[in-house]
Structures are given as structure tokens and as C-alpha cells.
Amino acid sequence: MKQGAAPDCPCGRTDGRGRPLAYAQCCGRWIDADAAAPDAESLMRSRYTAFARGDERYLLATWHASTRPAQLGLEPGVKWLGLEVRSHRVVDASHAVVEFVARSRLHGRADRLHETSRFVREADGRWYYVDGVVSGAAAHRPS
């Protein structure tokens, strides 16, 4: 990032030319402005960004009430290193599935989370994370 330039979004989304989107033009729209993410992939990316920024409030607000924990207790010191969205499948108008791999590091130890997450759109028009199936071991959950 150039001095004075807006910070890149942690989710890694790029524009049509392959340049990283700035946080404010990407996940910041959903996290800071409390706007509804337009699809399940955008919500998943914004949740990854919220994990990277330690924003428990946003994570809980975007977690479906049927599966949402009372609190998260985010692991201090986790550094999120990158996100790869492998697929985004629309099941129907109110259900979608997103498969992703998120990389992180804690106390010098690398971790890789491969998850297939389910999302639902409620009557309010907002998408919510419901749950996910993790492939392999995972210490942190950026869903």
C-alpha cells in the first residue's frame, strides 16, 4: 500500500483489473455502514474481514439466531493471512453455500481452515451465516 492510500480489504477481493479493493469500497460497506451484503459470498468475505479486524459485534450480528453463540471469545494474537473463495453456490433465492480456505498464524504456527458454509437470507433481505462443515483440523473459525 502506498503512503496515504486507503488500506486494502483483508478479504482479498479485487477489481476488474486484478487490483485489491480498498476496505471502504469492499467489506467496509457492510461492516461499518451496517448495510446488507448483497449475497452470501460478500457476507462470508465480510465475516472473514471482521475476524481479521477482531470485530465480534459484526460477527454475532451476521450469525443466524438459530445457531449464534452468546459470545465468541476471539483468539488474541491471531494474524489472518489470506482468504481463497473456492465456490459460491446459490441453492435457491434464500439459501447459498460458500466454500473457502482461510489462512492464519498464531504464535508462529500456521493454520489453514477449509470450510463449506451455509447461509440463509431472511425476510429482512439480509444474509446470515448458519453453520459450516470444516475439512481437517481448524483452530479458528472465520465464517
Image (tube, rainbow, N blue to C red):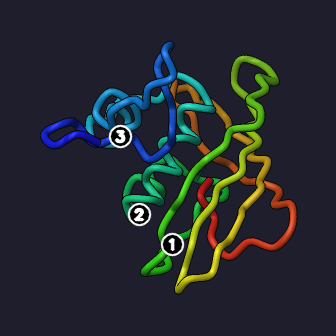
Residue 124 visible in this rendered orientation of the protein? no
Q: Nearer the viewer, residue 17 or 124?
A: 17
Q: Which residue is mark 3?
A: 8
The CA distance from mark 2 to mark 1 is: 7 Å
The amino acid beneath tag 3 is Asp
Are circles 2 and 1 on residues that touch, CB within 8 Å?
A: yes
Q: Is residue 123 left or right of residue 58?
A: right
Are circles 2 and 3 on residues that touch, CB within 8 Å?
A: no
Residue located farthest toward the left when viewing the structure as drawn: 4
Which disc, if any, is residue 56? Answer: 2
Q: Nearer the viewer, residue 114 or 63?
A: 114
The answer to which quarter of the image holds residue 45 is top right
x, y percentage for residue 77?
A: 43, 79
Which is in the foreground here, disc 2 or disc 3? 3
The amino acid beneath tag 1 is Leu
The CA distance from mark 1 to mark 3 is: 26 Å
x, y percentage for residue 94?
A: 69, 24
Residue sitting at 50 percent across and 43 percent down?
11
x, y percentage for residue 30?
A: 38, 35
Q: Is residue 47 above or below residue 97?
A: below
Residue located farthest toward the top when viewing the structure as drawn: 16
- Tag 2's secondary structure? helix
Q: Which residue is mark 1?
A: 72
x, y percentage for residue 62?
A: 50, 47
- Tag 1's secondary structure? loop
Q: Residues within 10 Å of mark 1 (few under 14, many from 20)?
A: few
Q: Nearer the viewer, residue 27 or 12?
A: 12
Is tag 2's residue or tag 1's residue first in the polypeptide sequence?
A: 2
- Tag 3's secondary structure? loop
The CA distance from mark 2 to mark 3 is: 20 Å
